Image (cartoon, rainbow, N blue to C red):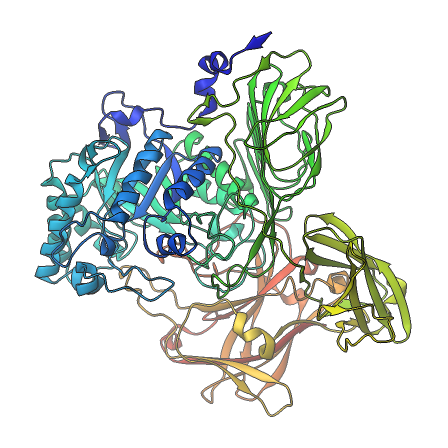
Amino acid sequence: MVLRITAIFILLFASCIPLKAQNKSAEQVIIDKKGVMRYKKSKEEIKGFGINYTVPFAHAWRSAKKMGIDPKEAMLQDIYHFTRLGFDLYRVHVWDTEISDSLGNLLKNEHLDAFDFLLATLKEHGFNAIITPIAFWGNGWPEPDEPTGSFSMKYGKKDALTNPDAIKAQQNYLTQFMNHMNPYTGLAYKDEPMILAFEVSNEPHHTGEAQEVTAFVKSMVEAIRNSGTTKPVFYNISHAVHFADAYFQGGIQGGTFQWYPTGLGYKRELEGNLLPNVDNYEIPFDSTIRRYQGAKIVYEFDAADVNKSYIYPAMARSFRTAGIQLATHFAYDPTYLAYANTEYNTHYMNLVYTPQKALGLMIASRIFHEIPMYTSFGKYPQDTSFQYVTLSYKQNLALYNGPDTYIYTNNTTTAPIKEEDIKKVAGWGNSPLVTYKGSGAYFLDKLTEGIWRLEVLPDPIAVENPFGRNSPEKTVSLIQWNQHPMQLTIKNLGRNFSIRGINKDNQLDTKTSNGLFMVSPGTYLLMRKDAFFISDITGKWGKVRLNDFYAPAADVKKQWFNHVPIKEASAKTDLKLSFQFIAPQRPVKTELIAYVDQDYRTIPIHYLSTGSYQTVIPADLLKSGILHYYVVITSHDNQTTTYPGAIKGHPYDWNFTGTKTFQTKIVPAEFPIHLFDATSDAEWLIKEWKPGFSLQPTTTQNESVVELNLQQLFTPDFENLNAKPVYDYSIRHSFTELIKGRKADLLTKSKLKIKAKSLNGKSTKLQVALILDNGAAFGKIIDLQPDILEYSIDLTELQEVNTVTLPRPYPSFLPYYFDHNNINPFDVSKVESLQFSIGPGIPESELKQPHGIGLVRVSLE
């Protein structure tokens, strides 16, 4: 019996897109007396979650052109991925500099056309939008700006807020922008139902007097209203928050917020548990917003310099607790640029290239659509499990285990709460329902009884630090299309089913009797033996087509190898080593040649998953001394390559030319565990920038001291002039990677040794604390003297102290200290970082005086 797919979708259409707006945006948007955006007619609360995405403008646009890529086709492909992730909201700060002249006249050009196309296509896919017409800055980043001749280029952000001619140009531009007719929809922006609201400009950073700020905001709102639009107008109130009243007195209906809880621009991945950084989005002036009945939305957020997947659902939870109604992540990397991550190198997000993080955003979208605003789940660690969500830092896991949906960002053993009702699975790795060794994401959607749609994305392989100095000539991630075994244990599907490839050029047509089959990237129909056959594989499926599939081509054309040796490891303890290796074909043999003194061993290296290998060096080899080792890889053509150095040949060959080895110090358990050394670690101290920071040599060979000379502990925050002074300056050093070879010895240590000094010829109090993997800090104050001395703290003397939230977040009004419910005592086996604080213990009469310290090294002994 043949059943046309169109008949099935009459029944399934609504369930295919459970998070979409489903044309409700055709209604007028209002904000009620409680500051909630609603559709006027139905009174339904508006919900939405999504992304910032910039292809029509600036670097993304230029890059597409240089690469010979059609931007519109690229947008279509990325929008398909947006729908797979359950997004239904779009935001962008329009690069006004590319679509305006110096007088604020709107220019109809390729950028505006591409933007119109993007909005129209998003609308077709059920999206709403929040649009910010003015960005203020040039179009260069990360490249040099181009001479566009716009008002933003002529005046810049600072003058744009005060110069009468600049204000006039912005008013002209805003009115014309509102009246612009999108040729793809036939509607002006002012009348476009999918545009829920407008945010005047991106991060204006006001100074001056409140009445001047109000006058400026009012002039912008009036320019928008002069177009005749009744849509809500929002303004950024997360900068210069002391002007909150002034903003609302200018006639806005709501405020926009950002959140970068891990700062910006660390230049490599941050270590340790970052759930404390996203535990609380407390708005200290929320009463002002409520007094004006204002709505709250987040225009940008991201955990920058973080490659973990557990953090986004925690941010979404904290947003909802704070009464945030809508949110858009910043920023989704166009797939064609994600190989290099050049657009914003402190951010990195793409379904294909960062699948685990993207699945975390998918869960965050669920949270925004399902958890009511102002719902509180308590403090950390209790709030790591809420509603259908479970978060685990140690497992790098976010799990959504709902009534009919099951999403996981990493391997999990937790079964669905009601497997027989599951209709949607999205995951990475293994679960009770799916066993899969590929490194790409996959999606399983129930179409009807016994028929499922499977989509498998290719394997991404990270080969460079994505958060460093990036370039189109530097590849940070590769894509490989591999065939992997997949085993499904879904009750509705059973073990006996057929697998049929349905995307373009996918010829797979096979069966399984035990749920196990081989699968490559693509889209498939899985049909139980007794299910009706589906013939129309190109039919509409919600807002997309059943056989849709988009992924970048494989680009592994040579060998890539990456391995960072462990600096120091414990003697007489097994040592696990991990490696990254990728080549056009998997090698036939991978092995380690290791030796300590003259004890040589050949140890197999085992394949784990695409690009990932691991081995264990046995304890009996690891006696005190220096471990030397090579990694030897034999390819299909019997060519042998040895690392480090990618030297052709084997270390045992008579003509082998390699002179370097990977090395690790092997030390007895009683040796100190080094936590910080100024020479190697000063660059990576996590701190808020202040003048007076420098690295200086000492009189001891190969020794340095990092000096921090503060003229004042508290500096007024020009973004929050009403903030209560906090006389504390803290810095953090994370050492999880540094000590991972010595963790077995932590419990043998009883003292914290600090080599340090004070500056300015006077003693200074310094609080030194160890932070555990739950974010709790335990420390003690020591009195530093002007000479470099070694100070000793018995671990039994450590008392619980405040944990400073570091890196410092944006916006700056967020809490300075981590407020938690941890009750566990100090446990040296769980230490992750050091916290140095200047401020605790200093007499009140001295808090406003200069203070300086110099740090040389810290160890556990």
Between 252 and 112, the one nearer to me in the picture = 112
Q: Is residue 120 visible?
A: yes
Q: Is residue 752 visible?
A: no
Rendered residue at 83%/70% (across/down)? 651
Residue 468 horizontal side relative to residue 212, left or right = right
Q: From what the image shows, is residue 675 above or below residue 25?
A: below
Where residue 149 appears, as percent x and y from the top left, is 19, 62
Residue at the top extreme of this rendering: 1
The part of the image, by quadrant, that contains residue 575 is bottom right
Q: Where, quadrant-wise, is the C terminus in this rendering?
A: bottom right
Q: Where, quadrant-wise, is the N terminus in this rendering?
A: top right
Where residue 491 appears, as percent x and y from the top left, is 67, 19
Between 683 and 278, the one nearer to me in the picture = 683
Q: From what the image shows, is residue 532 above or below residue 391?
A: above
Rendered residue at 62%/77% (across/down)? 857
The part of the image, by quadrant, that contains residue 477 is bottom right
